[in-house]
Image (spheres, grey):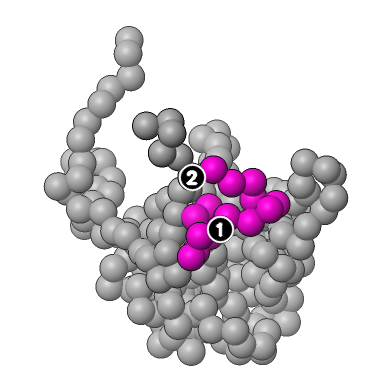
Amino acid sequence: MPGNIHFYEPAQGHGLAHDPFNALVAPRPIGWISSMSREGVLNLAPYSFFNAFNYTPPIVGFSSIGYKDSVRNAEETGEFCWNLVTRSLSDAMNQTCAAVGPETDEFILAGLTPKPSRIISAPHVAESPVTLECRVSQVLRLAGADGKTVDTWMVFGEVVGVHIAQHLLKDGVYDTAAAEPVMRGGGPADYFTVDAAQKFKMYRPG
């Protein structure tokens, strides 16, 4: 098996039809980030680099290649929301990928409803069954191993409010499969979802 390995150094190119990096670290939850500028202009954009990073306090983060509207709004106002992308919302999410100017409201573009949040000013997607209201804790510009900064920005936020649709809570436990979350794969157009058939249980050793 070791002799049948494709090895490459990213700095020298991968030599494949499509960069495999995103496919190797996958599937990844989508950071569907809603934010609002200081002037009150709404923004909604999906980020394929998103995850949770801490329990207490709960911290999530998304990474933006380029200093885009979501980063600017989050840094200026100190707030953003994460909205769960479900299978039924995948087409609307894809609409919010469009490269449009900062004056464009992606809620309107995708036919979605901005719903007032409970704690922060930035609204969230009313159609999404799960939302995390976040206050920005850190904004970091990423750097390579050589210390040189790159045009990528990491936004971390402490979760200060959680919205969960009641039908996704079964005996007090969140039912991941029932939500049909959509995750980013690796190919140019690859996405994945989760269903109950893929679930298995494994408890930590005592």
Q: Secondary structure at mark 2?
A: loop
Q: Tell me which segment is drawn in magenta.
A: 7-22
Q: Is residue 86 above or below residue 112?
A: above
The residue at the point 54 percent across, 64 percent down is: 47
91 and 122: which is toward the camera: 91
**Residue 63 visible in the picture:** yes
What amino acid is at disc 1?
Gly
Q: Quadrant of residue 98?
A: bottom right
Q: Which mark is residue 15?
A: 1
Q: CA distance from mark 2 to mark 1?
A: 10 Å
Q: Quadrant of residue 125?
A: bottom left
Residue 44 horizontal side relative to residue 69, left or right: left
What amino acid is at disc 2?
His
Asked whether the residues under the numbered discs 2 and 1 touch, taking CB atoms below 8 Å apart as contact, a structural biologist would say yes
Q: Is residue 53 above or below residue 176?
A: above
Q: For the residue carrying disc 1, how many other residues have a C-alpha within 10 Å: few (<14), some (14-19), or many (20+)?
A: few
The residue at the point 48 percent across, 89 percent down is: 109
Q: Which mark is residue 6?
A: 2
Percent from the top left, x then y, of residue 122?
59, 69
Q: Secondary structure at mark 1?
A: loop
**Residue 84 visible in the picture:** no
The residue at the point 35 percent across, 73 percent down is: 90
127 and 99: which is toward the camera: 99
The residue at the point 45 percent across, 40 percent down is: 5
